[in-house]
Image: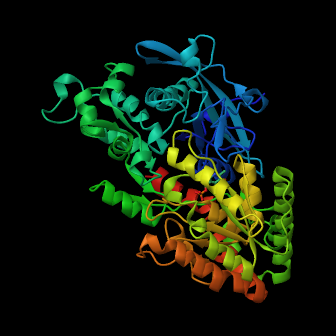
Amino acid sequence: MPSIEAFLSRTHIAYLSMEIAVRPEMRSYAGGLGILAGDVARSCADLELPVVFVTLLSRAGYFRQVIAPDGRQLEEPDWWQPERWCVPVNAMVAVEIERKPVWIRPWLYIHTCPHGHQVPILFLDADPDQNGNDDRALTHYLYGGDETYRLKQEIVLGIGGIRVLRALGFDLHTYHLNEGHAALLTLDLLNRWRIPPDERIAGELPYDVAEVRERCAFTTHTPVEAAQDRFPYELFERLLPDFVELDALKRLAGEDRLNMTRLALNLAGYVNGVARRHAEVTKQMYPGYRIHAVTNGVHAGTWTHSAFAKLYSAHWPHWQHEPEILVRALQLAEDEVWQCHERAKESLIEGVKAASGVALDPRIMVVGFARRMTGYKRPLLLFEDLDRLAAIASRRPFQVVLAGKAHPRDAEGKECVRRLNELIGRLRGRITCIFLPNYDMSMAMMLVAGSDLWLNTPLPPLEASGTSGMKAALNGVLNLSVPDGWWIEACIEGVTGWSIGREDDDPKQHASLLYERLENAVLPIYYEDPARWRSMMKQAIANIASYFNSQRMMRRYASEAYLR
Ligand SMILES: *Cc1c(COP(=O)(O)O)cnc(C)c1O
């Protein structure tokens, strides 16, 4: 029976995240944020970093995406069975919401890395019998419900999370808040460092904020204003009456609304953006804060297809622990790299056939595009001029595999899904395009490894980092992307992949620039200069995979954020 005791004395850092992708069958994640948190956990285990993870159980998952005959996205609950992978921990804590206790029971999942080291992941569950029916649903639907539901979830994560850790007996020096969702944890710490009334200085906060800052690190993940939580203070006051001094909270989290990003910025002694460009944009949004940049990375062992893993292991047995060694990839034999790619492409073709009935042609270039369906990711950009796209394909063919979920309340994103499916129909007979429903971790593994070209078309500067292109590079898949987020750092034009225009181009030109690159750079090399294509695959592995991995990311967090 796995137990939490073994971890108590050797764990000093807690990482809190609304979602964590531990394994595909555990539906406690929605997308990039959760996948990143999972890669953080996997790297912490590999590197033996003393971290415990805390997230919500999300029994009904994010949602299962079904595509209706008319192309619209339908959403169904995506229930999973925690007891298959986790054990309930015999410790419950209560948080008072609207002056009533909500009981939270943690479930323990233990992640074991290839050499045997383990890290604990705690899933918070508000579903014990002691709670009323409404409260029991609080940790069912990831990012579900309304504003009130979301704030309650964040109370469970931040305040419930730190109380569970304390109740279990952890002795922690750092709390790492992965995105603003966990920022209410700081309120619990403020209360611990409340200054007694007779020691207060007029005009200063009634809390010893320096003590809180010393204990908190914060990673912000999005420059999209609407994606950052802001709650009305009336709602906060209703759910958590008299929890902290409201005047003080307003000074820390914004006068008009409780802004979770601002709260975390003010109470974390270390703040990080997820790419250099993102850190700059965050500084413009929130002037006056010091924002570091540790660019995201992906877990090499998780995202590398087994064929490539075997090839890498033959050359560098320790490559999973130290993916930096992939910098030596230029010494790989080009036909071996190509054979590994053919295996990965076969896996994709089999997967597509099983999911859709469509048989892709292995000799034709596969363009992969899978990401959250939302306005700024511009999933329709490739299809802006169908006739031009079809004309390009008539000269040198390609096939397109698409996937992605839209948040149930993102009307624009849902319209993208419907429209994509409509456009795919209009291209029938000219270009094979397939939309695979229900994008998740296992589908991502198949797509990022088996595509020939990985496409990304965000509207700059809104892609904070992006990580799927990093997964592609681990498998020698070449990126064609708008220069934004991580790609600004990773692209060497014509060597590691291609950029769609330059950073300061007018976004209205992007579709045209995309067609131009596809037609004049990507397709001719793929079909007429296979030696150059294969050498670029090696350049992508050597220059991208060796650097944009989560071992490098966590070594930097360890030395810069955790060892302050
Ligand atoms: C990697 C991944 C993402 C994030 O990819 P982006 O490039 O940031 O869009 C989202 N969802 C799944 C399932 C993933 O594996």
Q: Residue at x 60, y 66 (%)?
A: 383
Residue extending farthest left: 202
Looking at the picture, tell me which residue is in the foreground, 326 or 345: 345
Looking at the picture, tell me which residue is in the foreground, 198 or 102: 102
Percent of width and height locating residue 223:
42, 55
Percent of width and height locating residue 453:
69, 71
Q: Is residue 191 left or right of residue 338?
A: left
Ligand 1 lies in quarter: bottom right
Percent of width and height locating residue 171:
52, 34
Percent of width and height locating residue 245:
26, 26
Q: What colouring style does the render use? A: rainbow
Looking at the picture, tell me which residue is in the foreground, 395 or 553: 395
Indicate whether 168 appears above or below 270.
above
Indicate whether 230 appears above or below 101.
below
Q: Residue at x 78, y 71 (%)?
A: 316
Q: Is residue 225 left or right of residue 418?
A: left
Res. 497 image quadrant: bottom right
Q: Residue at x 25, y 36 (%)?
A: 256
Is residue 268 at least partly visible in the picture?
yes
Looking at the picture, tell me which residue is in the foreground, 51 or 449: 449
